C-alpha cells in the first residue's frame, strides 16, 4: 500500500477542517458534485458569510478547491486528499477483518476443548 | 463467523466493522478481557502480540509489544474508557516508545465496541475513530502492513465462502 505522506502542517489543517460537522457535510456535498457557495449555503441555517468561512477552512486544508465562474464561486472536493485518508482506512479495515478471523479461531478452539 | 459489514468514512476518519460469531456474548467478551486470548488475535500472524499489562477496568491501562519477522518489537498501549460487561467497551489505543510508555504528542485512536446477544450468535460492532491522517500513518507504521497483506486472501475466503 502506498500512501503519500503529507506535511505535518497540512495534516493539522485537515484535522481542524474535519473536526466540524458542518464542514464535513459541506465537503461531502462538494465531493459528490461541484457547486457554488450559494448553492451550498441553501442547505444550512446560517448566513452565506458563515458558510463561506467554512469553505475557506476546507480550502486551506486542501480538501476543496474554489474557482470563479462569472459571479459565482464554485467549490469542488479534492479527491486526492480524501484518497490518502481512504487508503489508510482501507488498511485498517483489512487489519480488523483479520482480527475478526483470529477471534473466530480462538472461539472455535475453545468450543472444541470445552 | 460472518463479517456482516465494513464501512469506512474518509471524511470523518472512522471505520466500522460488524461481525457475528457462533458464541455467547460472554465468550466473545472474554477474548478481549483475557490477555492470553487477546494476544492470540490482536497482532497479525507475522506480528504476534504480547500483553505485559492488561488492567481491564475503567481507567485501567495495558501495555503490549508485537514481535515482527525480523525481531523488531513495535509497542503500544490501551486505556479503558468505558466498560459494561458483556455488552460495551470503549478504549484508547496508542503508540508506545521503546520504554513501553505512551509516546507524548501522538494521540490515540478511539475504539467503541458493542456486543449484542442474538441467541447463540453474538454480533460484535467495532467502531474505530482516528484523529488525523498523520496518526493513522504513524500507527500503521508499527509494522503491521506485511502481516495484513498476507492475510487478505484468507479473509476474502471467509467473507465470501465458496458456493
Image: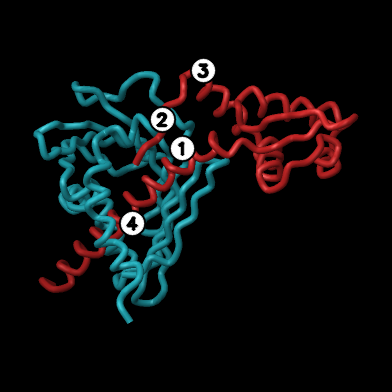
Chain colours: A red, B cyan
Whether labels 4 and 2 share one chain: no
Q: Within the image, what quadrant is residue B74 found in?
A: top left
Question: Disc 4 vs disc 3: Cβ atoms closer than 8 Å?
Answer: no
Marks 3, 2: nearer the viewer: 3
- Say what secondary structure mark 2 lies in: helix
Q: Can you give x and y, in whole percent of width and height, for residue B98 in the image?
A: 19, 22
Structural crowding at the residue carrying mark 3, measured as other residues with C-alpha within 10 Å and reported as few (<14), some (14–19) or many (≥20): few
**Disc 3 on helix, strand or loop?**
helix
User: The residue marked by circle 4 belongs to what chain?
Assistant: A
Q: Which mark is residue A77?
A: none
| Residue depicted at 27% across the width and 64% down the height | B27
Tell which circle, 2 or 1, labels the residue nearer the N-terminal end.
Answer: 1
Within 10 Å of the Cα at label 4, are there few (<14), some (14-19), or many (20+) other Cα atoms? many
**Disc 1 sits on a residue from what chain?**
B
Q: Kindly identify the residue that appears in the image at 47 percent across and 37 percent down.
A: A84
Tell me the distance, in whole angstroms, between the alpha carbons under discs 4 and 3.
32 Å
- Give whichever of discs 4 and 3 has the lower sequence position: 3
**Residues at badges 2 and 1 in contact (C-beta under 8 Å)?**
yes
Label 1, on which residue? B130
Residue placed under numbered mark 4 in the picture: A97
Across and down, in percent, residue A104 comes to: 25, 64
- The residue identified by callout 3 is A9
The residue pinned by badge 2 equals B135
Amino acid at each position: 500500500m502506498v500512501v503519500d505522506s503529507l506535511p505535518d502542517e497540512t495534516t493539522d489543517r485537515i484535522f481542524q477542517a474535519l473536526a466540524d460537522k458542518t464542514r464535513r457535510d459541506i465537503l461531502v456535498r462538494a465531493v459528490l458534485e461541484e457547486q457554488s457557495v450559494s448553492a451550498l449555503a441553501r442547505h444550512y441555517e446560517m448566513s452565506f458569510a458563515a458558510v463561506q468561512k467554512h469553505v475557506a477552512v476546507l480550502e486551506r486544508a486542501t480538501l476543496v478547491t474554489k474557482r470563479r465562474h462569472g459571479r459565482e464561486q464554485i467549490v469542488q472536493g479534492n479527491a486526492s486528499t480524501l484518497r490518502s485518508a481512504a487508503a489508510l482506512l482501507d488498511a485498517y479495515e483489512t487489519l480488523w477483518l483479520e482480527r475478526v478471523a483470529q477471534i473466530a479461531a480462538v472461539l472455535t478452539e475453545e468450543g472444541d476443548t470445552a | 463467523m460472518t463479517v456482516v459489514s465494513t464501512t469506512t468514512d474518509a471524511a470523518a476518519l472512522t471505520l466500522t466493522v460488524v461481525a457475528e460469531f457462533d458464541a455467547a456474548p460472554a465468550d466473545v467478551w472474554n477474548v478481549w478481557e483475557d490477555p492470553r486470548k487477546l494476544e492470540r488475535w490482536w497482532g497479525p500472524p507475522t506480528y504476534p502480540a504480547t500483553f505485559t499489562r492488561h488492567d481491564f477496568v475503567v481507567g485501567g491501562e495495558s501495555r503490549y509489544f508485537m514481535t515482527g519477522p525480523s525481531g523488531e518489537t513495535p509497542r503500544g498501549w490501551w486505556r479503558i474508557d468505558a466498560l459494561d460487561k458483556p455488552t460495551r467497551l470503549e478504549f484508547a489505543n496508542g503508540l508506545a516508545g521503546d520504554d513501553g510508555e505512551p509516546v507524548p504528542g501522538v494521540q490515540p485512536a478511539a475504539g467503541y465496541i458493542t456486543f449484542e446477544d442474538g441467541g447463540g450468535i453474538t454480533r460484535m460492532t467495532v467502531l474505530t475513530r482516528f484523529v488525523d491522517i498523520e496518526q493513522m500513518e504513524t500507527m500503521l507504521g508499527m509494522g503491521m502492513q506485511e502481516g495484513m497483506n498476507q492475510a487478505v486472501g484468507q479473509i476474502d475466503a471467509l467473507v465470501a465462502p465458496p458456493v
